Image: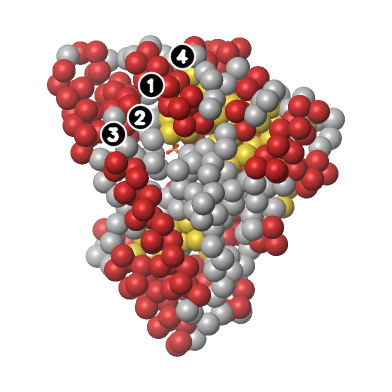
Amino acid sequence: MPAQWQSSRVTSIAASATVASVDRVKQLRAAGEDIIGLATGTPDFDTPAHIKAAGKAAIDEDRTYIIYTQSAGLPELREAIAAKLLRENNVRATPDEILVTIGVKQGLFTAALACLDPGDEVLIPTPTWVTYEACFTLAGAVPVYVPCGKAQNFRPDPEQLAKHITPRTRMIMLNSPGNPAGGVVTPEALSGIAELAIKHDLLVLSDEIYEHMVFDGRRNISIASLPGMAERTLTFNGLSKAYAMTGWRVGYVAGPRHIVRNMQKIHTHSVTCAAAFAQKAAVAALSGPQDDLHSYIKTLTSRRTQLIDGLNSIPGIKCGAPDGGIFCFPDISGLGISDQECSSLFLEKAKVSSLAGSAFGPGGEGHLRMAFARRNPNDIDIAIERLAAVLKKI
Ligand SMILES: Cc1ncc(COP(=O)(O)O)c(C=O)c1O
């Protein structure tokens, strides 16, 4: 018997596994447990002081930053985003081709509602961040998983995407560097994906939230900067990861004017705008000094090595080097237990949180997602000691 007042839309999705796990760690900590939280996608760093100061000053300045802004976002922020996209991504967008959102998440949901009809198919390379599927399913569309697993270092590949194209395919969801496994699309593969999108008249959604976290000489290339792609790409980005601003809730999307206008229509009804003072802080983040970002990336680079080496020192765990992002995605299949069992064991017995790889779709099973965005290097050393000690006992 279906429950009352429960839509088929909501029963078609699961709650976010990543958010649930972070909530669980908060509960355990509140109960006095000493948990090292490696499950979270929240960088364990502080928002740089000049950005905080800009937010605080905005609240006190006058009423401009404590009331609704233009629904599309503060003009000065959209100017700053346009300048950033040109400077860092070689992507040209005018302020009316940009929508300021309440984080990338809200931008993605709005795009799904604005661009997809029921039955439309969206290609998603896996393992993948859990939210994409939910966005497309809630919009009535059909997420089509394209396994791009360990054998190819978790890098999306045009040939595999091509095999899943049908007359109903409308979109490709790209996330490079990727969550959970850090794959960065190679320049050749990116050109191949662009060709595929043009040939089959597909829209590309490119989530570039981890753009700065690329390692071993790699760099992020925005697919919208490739020939013929600006008119068929929505580029998503936000302040959460690069500036440790997850709680400020500011993101943005840039793309073809008619799509951004349609998204804005939904935005005016659903959220009106992102928080005004947070938008003002975002201007300071994007237009101000980038020294904090540079030193943060340096720190992340060394934490990544530390976590990889630590995990590889434990018998039964194999951890490759992620191309980018803030997570390691070790293969734990050598331990002889499932990824869910392993994640529960680590949380309950070692007090180290991680996420089971199977939550991230095909190719994720047998792996754990563990974040290395930790301020304190001791956290990683202690986590590794605790995991090794627990595994010795079983
Ligand atoms: C790939 C990816 N995109 C987007 C987000 C969320 O970004 P925001 O805080 O801007 O909503 C996350 C957060 O974990 C993520 O991993």
3D distance between C-alphas at marks 1 and 4: 9 Å
Residue 328 seen anywhere in this rendered image of the structure: yes
Is label 3 or label 2 in front? 3
**Residue that badge 1 annotates:** 80
Residue 137 seen anywhere in this rendered image of the structure: no
Q: Specify few, some or many for label 4: CA neighbours under 10 Å numbering under 14, 14-19, or 20 or more.
A: many
Q: Amino acid at mark 1?
A: Ala
Please tell me the numbered disc located at residue 344.
none
Q: Earlier in the sequence, mark 3 or mark 1?
A: 1
3D distance between C-alphas at marks 2 and 4: 15 Å
Please tell me the numbered disc located at residue 289.
3
**Residue that badge 4 annotates:** 95
Image location (x, y in percent) of residue 325 = 49, 50
Residues under numbered marks 2 and 1 in contact, where contact means CB atoms less than 8 Å apart: yes
Q: Earlier in the sequence, mark 2 or mark 4?
A: 4
- Kindly tell me whether mark 2's CB lies below 8 Å from ligand 1: no
Q: Is residue 257 left or right of residue 274?
A: right
Q: Specify few, some or many for label 2: CA neighbours under 10 Å numbering under 14, 14-19, or 20 or more.
A: some
**Residue 114 lies in what quarter of the image?**
top right
Is label 3 or label 1 in front? 3
- Kindly tell me whether mark 4's CB lies below 8 Å from ligand 1: no
Q: Residue furthest left?
A: 60
3D distance between C-alphas at marks 4 and 3: 22 Å
**Residue that badge 2 annotates:** 286
